[in-house]
Image: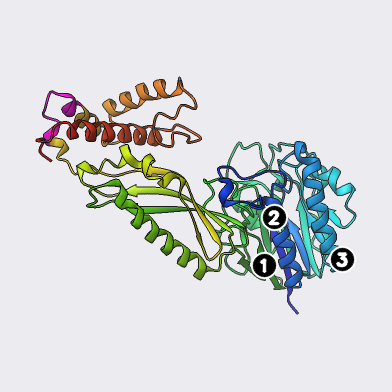
Amino acid sequence: MPVRILAIGDLHLGRRPSRIPAAADPAARLTPAAAWERCVERAIQGRADAVLLAGDVVEDSDDLYEAFPDLRRGVERLAAHDIPVAGVCGNHDGTVLPRLAESLPAFRLLGRDGTWEDTELAGVEVLGWSFPGTTAPDSPLAQPLPPRRGSRPRIGLLHCDRDQTGSRYAPVRSADLQAADTDAWLLGHIHRPDALAGPRPIGYLGSVLGLDPGEPGPRGPWWIRVDGPGRIEAEHLPLAPLRWEALTVSADDISHADELHPRVMAALDGLHLELSRAGTEAQAVGCRLRITGRPAAAAGIEIRLQATGLGELHEVRDGVHYFVESVRVATEPPLDLERLAEGSDPVGLLARRLLVLRRAPDDAERAELIRRARTELETVPGQRTYWNLDAPELDEARIAEILEQAARRALEQLLEQQPGTAS
C-alpha cells in the first residue's frame, strides 16, 4: 500500500498575521496555531502515516511559552492516533526548537547541530538537517549524506535558501539537490510554494498561512504519496484559515467615485466563486484592491476614495469574511498629456512630470526625479501623505508609482478648477 505523509512548511507558531481588522477575525483564529490545528485534523482524518515539519515551526525564542502549548497539543493528538512526527530546525527556531523537542518525546528532531541524520517512518527513509543556530553560511550539501538504507524510498527534509550564493541561510544549489541520492526534497524557508510536480518532487512547501498581504494565493500543507523509489506524488491542500488575494477593478467610464462600489461587489462575488470552486477552506480573505482604467476626469476617484468607505469594506459570503487590506489607484486620466505638457502653467508642469515618469528606467531625467523624491520620502517615515504609503521598501518602481498617484490627483484638482481644459 502507498504511504501517505502530510508535509508542512513554515508554520511560525507564535506569530500573528498583520493588517487584519477585528471585524474579519472576531474569534482571533486567523493564526498559524489555527492552521496547525487544521493540519493535525486533516492528518488524522486522512489516516496519515507520518507528519513532517520543514523548519521555522516556531517564530523565535521569544515565542517559546506561547508556541509550545500549541505544538504539544498537536503532536500529542497525532501520537494518540499512532502518527509519528519528525522535523528539522530553520533559521527562526534553530535555538528554540531543540529545547521544545526535549519536552516532546513524540516529536523526532532530525539533524541537530547541523549534521545529517536519517530515520525510518512507515517504511520511508526521511533524511534531515537542522540549523545549528540562526544562520548557516555553508551549504548543508557540502557534507556527505548518510548511505541509503537498502531499497526504501528516501525523502530529504531541509530548510534552506536555494540558488542564493552568499546567503547566510543554508545556501544550496538546485544542481546539488538534483544530484543527491534522494527520491524527493521537501524544502522550507521560502513562503511561496513550488509546484512539486513529477515523480521526484523537489521544491518549497511554502508557508501554511499567509503571514502578510505580500503572501497571496493558496497556503497549506501537502499530501505526499509514496508508492516506492522514484514514485512520489505531491498534492497541495489549501487549508489556511486566512488567504490574501489581489482584486483588480476597472474604473473605465465612471463619472463619480460612488460608482465603484457595485463594481467592487461584482469583483468580490467573482473572487468568492473562483475560490469556492478551487476548494479553498479560508475563513477570511484579505484583498489588495487595485483600481485601474480611465474614469471621467470629474470622477475625482483619488480625492473621494476615502469618503466612499472602500478602504474599510467588509463583506461576508457563505460565512467567509472578505475585507480590503489596502487600496491602490492606478487609473489613467483621460487626458492628452502631450498636448497639456505644452503649457507653461502648473497643469503643463504636472503633465510633463507624468511623461518623464513613463520613460525607460535608465532615462537620466526620470532617475533624477526619483532620486529627489526618495530623499523627501525617506525623511518622513510612516507619514501617510499618499494613499497606502506603507510598502516595506521604497524601490524605484514604488517611488514612481507614488509620484504618479500624486501628480494625477493634483492634475484632476487643477482641471476641475479649469472647466474649459481640453482632454
Q: Which mark is residue 80?
A: 3
**Mark 1 or 3: the one toward you:** 3
| Left or right of 365 in this view: 289 | right
Task: Return the disc, 1 or 3, that comes first in the chain's sequence.
Answer: 3
Residue 186 in magenta? no
For disc 1, the neighbor class at 10 Å (few under 14, some 14 to 19, many from 20) is many
Q: In the rendered image of this protein, does residue 277 appear above or below residue 170?
A: below
Residue type, label 2: Ala
Nearer the observer, 399 or 126: 399
- Residue at 14%, 32% in the rendered image: 418
Residue type, label 3: Ala
Judging by the rendered image, the residue that carries numbered circle 2 is: 34
- Residue at 31%, 25% in the rendered image: 369
Q: In the rendered image of this protein, does residue 373 appear above or below residue 286?
A: above
Query: In the rendered structure, are the residues bearing label 1 and label 3 in contact, judged by CB atoms less than 8 Å apart?
Result: no
Q: Position of residue 308 (x, y in %)?
A: 37, 45
**Mark 3 or 2: the one toward you:** 2
- Secondary structure of the residue carrying numbered label 1: strand
Q: Which residues are magenta?
A: 339-349
Q: Position of residue 331 (x, y in %)?
A: 29, 44
- Secondary structure of the residue carrying numbered label 3: helix
Q: Is residue 171 visible?
A: yes
| Left or right of 323 in this view: 386 | left
Nearer the observer, 350 or 100: 350
Spatial separation of the CA atoms under disc 2 and disc 1: 19 Å
Judging by the rendered image, the residue that carries numbered circle 1 is: 223
Spatial separation of the CA atoms under disc 3 and disc 2: 20 Å
Q: In the rendered image of this protein, does residue 316 appear above or below residue 31?
A: below
Residue type, label 1: Trp
| Left or right of 276 in this view: 52 | right
